[in-house]
Amino acid sequence: MATFSSANPWIAILKGLWVSIRHFFGNLGLFLRGRQDFAIHFPEQRLVQPPALRGMPVLAQMADGKERCVACGLCEWACPTSCITIYPAETADEVERYPEIFDIDMSRCMFCGLCEEACPEEAIIMSRQIEIASYSRRGSLWHKADLLVPVNQLKTRTDYLRRNYER
Amino acid sequence: MLDPERKNPAVPIEGNPAAALEELHTPPMRLQFGPSHPATHGTVKITLDLEGEQVVWSDVEVGYLHRGFEKECETGYYYQNIPYTDRLNYSSPILNNTGYCMAVEKLFGIATPERCNYIRVIGCELSRMADHMLCIGASAMELAAFTPMLYLIEGRELILDMVDSLCGARVTTNFVRIGGVSADMPANFADFARPRLDRALKLFEDADKLLTENPVFRQRMEGTGYLSREDLVAWGVTGPMLRAGGEPYDVRKVHPYLVYGELDFDVPVGEHSDNFDRYLVRLEEFRQSRRLILQCLEGIPDGPVDADDPRVRWPGKGRVFNRMEELIDQFKLVTEGGMPPAGEVYHAVEAANGELGFYIVSDGTGKPWKCRCRAPSFSNMSPLSKMITGGQLADVVPTFGMINMIGGECDR
Amino acid sequence: MSAEKPEEKAPAAPELSPLLEKVLARLGDRVLAHRTARGDDRIHVARERILEVVRILRDDPELNFDLLLDVTAIDYFGQPDDFETKLQVWDRNRATMRRLPQRRHELALPPRGSEPRFAVVYHLTSTRLAHRLRIKCRVPEDDPKLASVTPVWPAANWLERETWDLYGIVFDGHPDLRRIYLYEEFVGHPLRKDYAKHGEQPIQEYVGPGAKEPRRPH
Ligand code: SF4
Ligand code: SF4
């Protein structure tokens, strides 16, 4: 473990100063050589997130503009904070059911991803969207129309998930 | 044994305190330390009676972050409680996930596959590293050493990057599942992790160089917060605090779980049982955790990451989409939860602050009848009053810092 | 589901784990019942003898339970026993390939027995011998009292305060039995099963300094 130069605490202080000076000049040198990533200037620059990132849950929208969800209610059931509300309705389509109302209360959602894991249709997917601040509480209630995202925009996440599908 | 060179921590007040008080004609001053004090990294109220600078009486009040974790658990299915465990010790969430899931697995009698165990160990040790970095950094900052905090936070970010690539979140991990983990490691995880671990270690060494020999830091840490080994055990203290008192009790060694029995690591013990030794033990545990991760990255076998147990582990989506039986299974498991046999289990893991135990009583339905979390911070906090009474006011801060009370876990 | 009684099975002679053997030899008839399940050993003792039992467990060099890990309670609200009957029902249902009982009322359980409502649970371990033991004491609802183990382990101080706070079990001889998580004016004990999860508490009037001053308009 540590060796203590108790005879002369000044030496210890100088050693510590040397560490911080080394950091200072190291960083300065990197800066002069053009390293820019000391700070991410947020709205202009974005952090590079791993493919595993769980952002807010969104609904997958298929090419014909309809949602893939069949209103089975599993995500509603699995959600620990009960922040999903679904009103199912019937349609003449092949799937026969669709959610008339699909609301997620983002002020209660904790981005846990259990809804995505429960969904038997790959219809609710954790997107890469994490900026969901709103000016009012009502603004954090997301309705179906806001939640729909075209499937091809969710490709990173679905590719990540499909890795695990055949387990 | 206390080193004679170190100053005696618990200097008793000379003679009879009451008589001394009468002589001075100054009533003790009552000081409220907290609930939100800038020099404590936790929401706790410490009421102190001060005689000059000396603490003559103290009372510690916790509970400002009580959220009813146990009540909440009783109303959720077993799988729904995993995200709640993230919020116990929020600086090392994967450890809590693992503790809870292993307790439920014990209830079911599930053995997880080898690869899953290795991934869990990697996650646990990453969490432990992050927790120790935060603890040392925050404690140093409370003693006015700000630079190490910056280095350690930078190192912690690197570790959280690894956690992030494992499970998609930095703090609210929700990583471990009953009978497996939520996802396998990314393919290039070892190459991703090694340079980051090296860089984190370098930053850690720099913080070590700044702190360990610094005379100011040492004077505030050495000899303060002393509690004898017998007292530590009697007060139910575990983790780095107990080991700093010379008692090598580490759940990873005593009751090996996951693959800790096969891995090679040392359990550092201190001898003075003061704050400085607690700090040194944490320093060394950080290095041991890194060693463990490197061993795991080296030795991780191929294979499945999920136990093949249809009672509890949700079927793979590939089968859910295409086959009727698995679809029904998915519906049953989500709407009923996995139903363990009735009975009760206690399972403990070594969390960053001590023994984290989960005591689960099942009545045979999909929801726990009782889910008790034995939180290390709670037991470690209980002797705080004893440790600070009789000492100086300034010693409260390093003692509290080295207990590393995490409000979410202590108050649940 | 028919309300048939679970058939009386003669309990198979339980195998004693090495630890339980030692504990039983030392404690004798102070142990009311014992069980080893899933690698955990537990004993049941009468609440009058808890202090006596834990003293022996701590001081005996063969047992040496010096570290008290946890004190908590279980509320067996309306449940007949420690779910042991339920385990038998579960096994029987599984054996006959019936659908597993999903909801609590579907279980054919005997009527609520004479067992007291609460159980106080202690988890002990030994730092030197590395074994764990669980002690359970049944405590009735109308007289939820138990001797405090604070004289044996000071660690019990906060843990018993927590158990009092959340379950309302009184520990006799505790030096400072206050609520620890909740405030003193809190009504009821929230971890009891008859406390609603969304139960509301009466609003407490603030009576401290400045209470009568008008609030700043917002
Ligand atoms: S991410 Fe979690 S909390 Fe949010 S909607 Fe899905 S299940 Fe509910
Ligand atoms: S689980 Fe999937 S398909 Fe079912 S309601 Fe939720 S989003 Fe729709």
Image: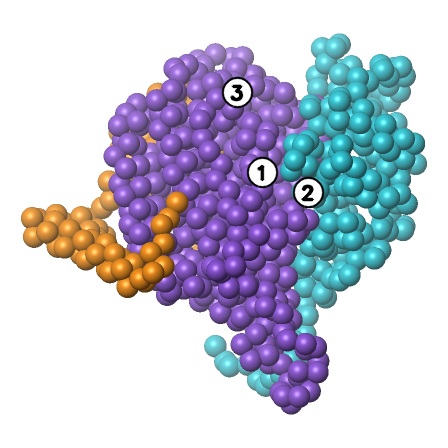
Chain colours: A orange, B purple, C cyan
Residue farthest along the left direction in this orientation:
A33
CA–CA distance between discs 1 and 3?
Answer: 26 Å
The image position of residue A29, as x and y in percent, is 10, 51
Front disc: 1 or 3: 1
SS under mark 3 = loop
**Label 1 in the same subunit as label 3:** yes
The image position of residue C127, as x and y in percent, is 64, 38
The image position of residue A97, as x and y in percent, is 47, 27
Amino acid type of the residue that numbered disc 2 sits on in the rendered structure: Leu
| Residue C116 appears in the figure | no
The image position of residue A59, as x and y in percent, is 38, 35
Amino acid type of the residue that numbered disc 1 sits on in the rendered structure: Tyr
Q: Which residue matches tag 3? A: B112
Please give the chain letter of the residue carrying mark 2.
C
SS under mark 1 = loop
Observer-nearest residue: C54 or C114? C54
Residue B157 in the image: above or below residue C181 = above
**Residue B344 located left or right of residue B64:** right
